[in-house]
Amino acid sequence: SSHSDDDQLFFAGLLPYYAVERDYQVLVIYLTDHYNTAPGRRHEVLTGLWAVGVKTYPIFGHYEDFGDATTAEEAFRKFARYGHSQEEMTNFVVEQLRRFKPMVAVGHDLKGEYGHAQHRAYAKMLTDAVEISGDAACHPESADQYGTWDVPKTYIHLYKENPIVMDWDQPMKNFNGMTPYQVSKKLGFPAHVSQQKGW
């Protein structure tokens, strides 16, 4: 997830369904930690995750938050002005895949849902990282530390080929019979108090 509320918005339903109803270990890895714009959002993240049943502490990238780029390429140029190369950022994602060895990785739309450049950039990093995380010659430091990992399944939001449509409107056994979507909408996203206006 690029930002601290994107997981509750664009992946609504996924978190409570897999973390609670299916009892799988779910880990969210955020690209930015908002330290340059709104450091208090970290507290909202934890409240939102705990509310939907995700108990694994998230990972925060150390990347800046900005909203004025329009393409992934422009976002990478902006990150470069902050001192972060695209290769370094992709290496961050490769390292997380190797470290946590997920059975499934889920990421943003390649077109950034509504065109958000940081969503586009993170989707590009994830798809690139999935391709190279199994190759020890790519980013050998994390390969030495964690070994390599070929992610068995990767799902990209709104991907047009071989689409899988999840029904988040079926009542769950947990959360008093709420649907996964209702849990994200009524419990998860409202925890992001700073983001309530205009969304």
Image: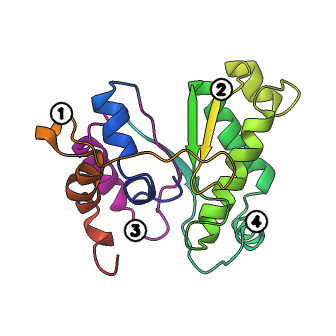
Does the magenta-highlighted stretch encompass residue 140? no
Say which quadrant the C terminus sits in.
bottom left
Sequence-first tag of 3 and 4: 3
Q: Which residue is mark 1?
A: 174
In the drawing, what numbered circle is on residue 80?
Answer: 4
Of marks 2 and 4, the one in the foreground? 2
Residue at x 72% of width, y 18% of height: 147
How far across and down, in percent of the image, does residue 109 sit? 61, 58
Q: Which residue is mark 3?
A: 38
**Label 1: how many residues lie within 10 Å, few (<14), some (14-19) or many (20+)?**
few
Residue at x 26% of width, y 37% of height: 53
Disc 4 residue type? Ala
Residue at x 66% of width, y 45% of height: 162
Q: Which residue is mark 2?
A: 152
Q: Which residues are magenta?
A: 26-55
Sequence-first tag of 2 and 3: 3
In the image, residue 11 sits, relative to residue 105, either above or below, namely below
Secondary structure category for the residue under label 1: loop
Sequence-first tag of 2 and 4: 4
The answer to whether the residue labelled 1 contacts the one labelled 3, judged by CB atoms less than 8 Å apart, is no
Left of 115 or right of it: where is 26? left
